[in-house]
Image: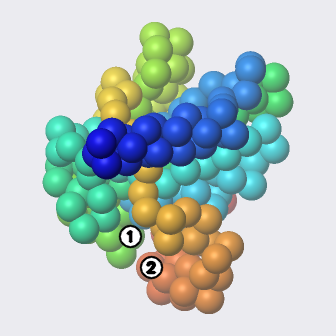
Amino acid sequence: MRLTSLFTLITGLFMTTLAANPAAAGTEKAVFAGGCFWCMEAELQELEGVASVTSGYTGGTTKNATYQSMGDHREAVEVVFDPAKISYEKLLESFWDNIDPTDAGGQFYDRGSHYHTAIFYANDVQKKLAEASKIDRQKRLEDPIVTEILPATVFYVAEANHQDFYKTNPDHYNSYKKGSGRKEKLKKLWKK
C-alpha cells in the first residue's frame, strides 16, 4: 500500500511539474553540446526569442545520467525558442560563435569526451540547416571542423546547482570563464 501511495505521489508531482511548465505552443527545441554547459547556457539564454535554456547530458547510452555518473554523454544545453522571434539558423550562429569546432579534445579548460561539441537535430529541417551552417563555417577556418551533427536522443536534465550557474554563482562563473581564456580564443578563431 505504501509503495502504491509513493508512486501516486511521485506521478502526481511529475504531472504537476509538466502542467506548470509545458512547452508553449509554437515553440521548438534545439540541443547543442558546446563544452561546458554553463558557458553555452549563459550565451544562449540572453538571445531574444529564447524562452529557456536547460543544462544537461545527452548523446550517450548511459541511463539516468548525472554529473557524477555521466557515462558516455556530453554536457549539453536544451534550448526552447520561439521561431517567430528567433530562427534556428540564429541559434546555430550563436552556437558556432561560442565554440572552437576544430578542437577534438574538448573545449578550452574542459578536456575529454564529455566536452566534445555536437549539434543534436530534432528533425530533417534542423539537420539540413546544421549541415549547411557547418559547411559555411568550415570556409572560415583552416583546420577541419570536428563538431558532429547527430540525431537528438534522450536529454537528461542536470542537477539544480548547474542550472543558471552564471546567474546563481556569478563570481565562480566569471572566474572560470576568464581563466579558461575562452573569450580571447574565440575572438582569435572567429576574427571578431
Q: Which disc is residue 108 wearing?
A: 1
Residue 9 visible in the displayed image? yes
Place of residue 171 in the rendered image (x, y in percent of width and height, measured from the top left): 62, 88
Place of residue 126 in the rendered image (x, y in percent of width and height, measured from the top left): 51, 20
The residue lying toward the viewer, choosing from 22 and 41, is 22
Q: State whether residue 132 is above or below residue 52.
A: above
Query: In the drawing, does residue 45 fall left or right of residue 64?
Result: right
Q: Residue at x 50, y 65 (%)?
A: 160
Q: State whether residue 110 is above or below residue 96.
A: below
Q: Amino acid at mark 2?
A: Ser
The residue lying toward the viewer, choosing from 137 and 38, is 38
Category of crowding for the residue at label 2, using alpha-carbon neighbours closer than 10 angstroms: few (below 14), some (14–19), many (at least 20): some
Category of crowding for the residue at label 1, using alpha-carbon neighbours closer than 10 angstroms: few (below 14), some (14–19), many (at least 20): many
Query: In the drawing, does residue 47 fall left or right of residue 162?
Result: right
Q: Residue at x 55, y 35 (%)?
A: 15
Q: How many marks?
A: 2
Question: How far separated are the C-alphas under marks 1 and 2?
Answer: 6 Å
The residue lying toward the viewer, choosing from 72 and 176, is 72
Q: Which disc is residue 175 wearing?
A: none
Place of residue 121 in the rendered image (x, y in percent of width and height, measured from the top left): 44, 25
Check if mark 1's residue and mark 2's residue have beta carbons within 8 Å: yes
Place of residue 64 in the rendered image (x, y in percent of width and height, measured from the top left): 26, 47
Residue 140 visible in the displayed image? no
Mark 1 or 2, nearer chain start: 1
Query: In the drawing, does residue 124 fall left or right of residue 106?
Result: right
Q: Quadrant of residue 146?
A: top left
Q: Which disc is residue 180 wearing?
A: 2
Q: Residue at x 18, y 45 (%)?
A: 62
